[in-house]
Amino acid sequence: MDSGEMKWRSACPICSALDVLGDRWTMLIVRDLIVHGPRTYSELLDSPEGIATNILADRLSLLSSLMLVERVNPDSPARNNAFRLTKGGEALRPVLEGLGKWAQVNLKNFHQDMLRMPDSPKKRK
Amino acid sequence: MDSGEMKWRSACPICSALDVLGDRWTMLIVRDLIVHGPRTYSELLDSPEGIATNILADRLSLLSSLMLVERVNPDSPARNNAFRLTKGGEALRPVLEGLGKWAQVNLKNFHQDMLRMPDSPKKRK
DNA sequence: CTTTAGACTTGCAAAATGCAAGTTATACTC
DNA sequence: GAGTATAACTTGCATTTTGCAAGTCTAAAG
């Protein structure tokens, strides 16, 4: 995928963020990379929400084209070559933390089984 | 719409937030209500991104059922009866601010025309 | 060299979105 | 208070996106 294919709906930064991240799956991929650190395609597939293989490939390709995600070994073949967040992707961490905390407070009455804390982040080296 | 219809993909709070907010339009409605304060249906329709009427009605209904948005005058007819954020909806403000700032820094190379600050209100006739 | 398995790709059904037009009812005008 | 204008939706249908199952490709293991 080419980042030149992106369609920006307006000049608003919030809208632009949503042009990239505003769907059911993209931020979940980011979440997995924040929580677990670098992960391979099939590790990402194993997340409990059950993303489809074609969607995962599509979103990784989009995130890569925007330089939010990259391969750990850019010049090696794909097999077992994990994806990780770039600095730009990593900068979403506080946003996702805010979303999680917001949900814990404001959705708890509608979703009884929601966890009180997200999986504890693993320290990156 | 009934909040009982919500399908939660997992117990993860971040995912739960995205079960509600993770689409192209919902957070843009929240953005408009944060930026402008209370707004009517047709004022929300006038936002530059051009949400469709059926989608706007659907999302307002969903946000209302989750008590994130409410009518300014709950017992009056719909006409000119604006929507506003509840406390729970208002609590998304820092998340949206974070998203906007993230985009300004991390998408600027891909979206030349992005504003440094969100849109100012558009006047209706 | 043969087999295995990870990383995708493809094809099609189902759901969501987008668009135009239609409907309802309330407020305004006379 | 009758007529009209218009805000707030609703409906129907075309288009796009998502979801699912199966298939392909190729590096790595044996």
Image (tube, coloured by chain):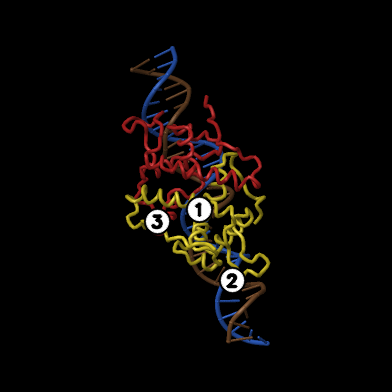
Chain colours: A yellow, B red, C blue, D brown
Near-viewer residue (C27 or A24): A24
Give the tally of numbered discs. 3
Q: Are marks 3 and 2 in contact (CB under 8 Å)?
A: no
Which numbered dot is residue A93?
Answer: 1
Quadrant containing the N terminus of chain A is bottom right
Chain of the residue under the numbered disc 1 shown in the image: A
Chain of the residue under the numbered disc 3 shown in the image: B
Distance of label 1 from label 2 (alpha carbons): 25 Å
Residue at (40% x, 35% y) in the render? B84
Q: Secondary structure at mark 3?
A: loop
Residue type, label 1: Arg
Where residue B24 sits in the image (x, y, percent)? 51, 47
Side of B9 relative to A76 (left or right): left
Which numbered dot is residue A80?
Answer: 2
Near-viewer residue (A77 or D10): A77
Q: Are marks 1 and 2 in contact (CB under 8 Å)?
A: no
**Which of the two discs, 1 and 2, sits closer to the camera?**
1
Distance of label 3 from label 1 (alpha carbons): 22 Å
Residue type, label 3: Trp
Residue at (48% x, 60% y) in the render? A35
Where residue A36 sits in the image (x, y, percent)? 49, 63
Q: Do discs 3 and 1 belong to a common subunit?
A: no
Q: Secondary structure at mark 1?
A: helix
Name the residue carrying label 3: B8
Could you classify mark 1 by the number of other residues whose Cα lies within 10 Å: few (under 14), some (14-19), or many (20 or more)? some
